Amino acid sequence: MSSAPFTYEPVGATRDDPTVCPPGFHPLYVRTRIGEGREVFQRAAEAVLTWEMHRALGVGIDATADRAAPGVDVTVTLAGVVKAPCRIIWTAEEPRRAGWAYGTLEGHPECGEEVFMVDRTGDGTVWLTVAAFSRAAKWYARAGGPATRGLQHAYARRCGVVLRRLCADTPEP
């Protein structure tokens, strides 16, 4: 784990409520149905916890571990040029919920926290939630204004599409 400080506060705010949005930040909340059943949940959870979903999106992932865990540093590379350094803050690996949140480090175009969480509801439906609070940190993110937030929402929706595709060959009940 590096000693680089997070670029925002409150670190870990999404743990109990992924919809939290501190003053001065912009919220993001996208929930996508992935499928149904225990096998779909297990497949989706593994894809999120091991960076497979992100890699399937076509983004570069350089992580200090093969699996999400608190303290793991991750640099996401978008479009081959935009580097976004982060650190995993917390993870969940529970019977009906699995995922993680990371917080931004110096050099990230935004500052804030983002959650990628798979959950299985009482009726067996499997969902991916991508939630965040963020604000621009780099000049080009500020210059993008609402378009930057639109790209974040598009990325979150694309995560759901890609994860659904990754789980498509998983047998449903």
Image (cartoon, rainbow, N blue to C red):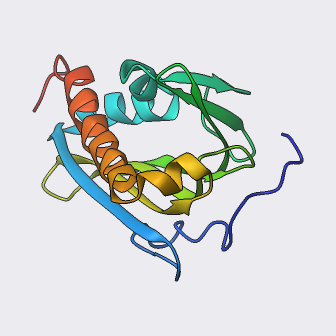
Q: Is residue 162 left or right of residue 55?
A: left
Residue displayed at 51% across by 62% down: 134
Quarter of the image that includes the N terminus: top right
On screen, residue 66 above or below 3: above
Name the residue at the bottom extreme: 23
Measured as percent of width and height from the top left, residue 32 is found at 20, 47
Name the image quarter holding the C terminus. Answer: top left
Q: Nearer the viewer, residue 40 or 156?
A: 156
Q: Relative to the observer, which residue lies in front, 108 or 89?
A: 108
Q: Is residue 114 left or right of residue 166?
A: right
Name the residue located 27 percent from the left edge and 43 percent from the top edge.
Answer: 154
Q: Position of residue 50 (x, y in %)?
A: 52, 27
Residue at 45% x, 75% y: name it.
20
Residue 48 sits in quarter:
top left
The part of the image, by quadrant, that contains residue 6 is: bottom right
Asked if 101 appears above or below 59 in the picture, the reply is below
Closer to the camera, 40 or 141? 141
Q: Residue at x 40, y 19 (%)?
A: 58
Percent position (x, y) of residue 16?
50, 72
- Tally the marks: 0
Residue 164 visible in the snapshot: yes
Q: Tell whether 162 sits left or right of 149.
A: left
Q: Is residue 64 left or right of residue 13?
A: right
- Work out whether residue 114 can be spotted: no
Q: Residue 57's x, y, as percent? A: 36, 24
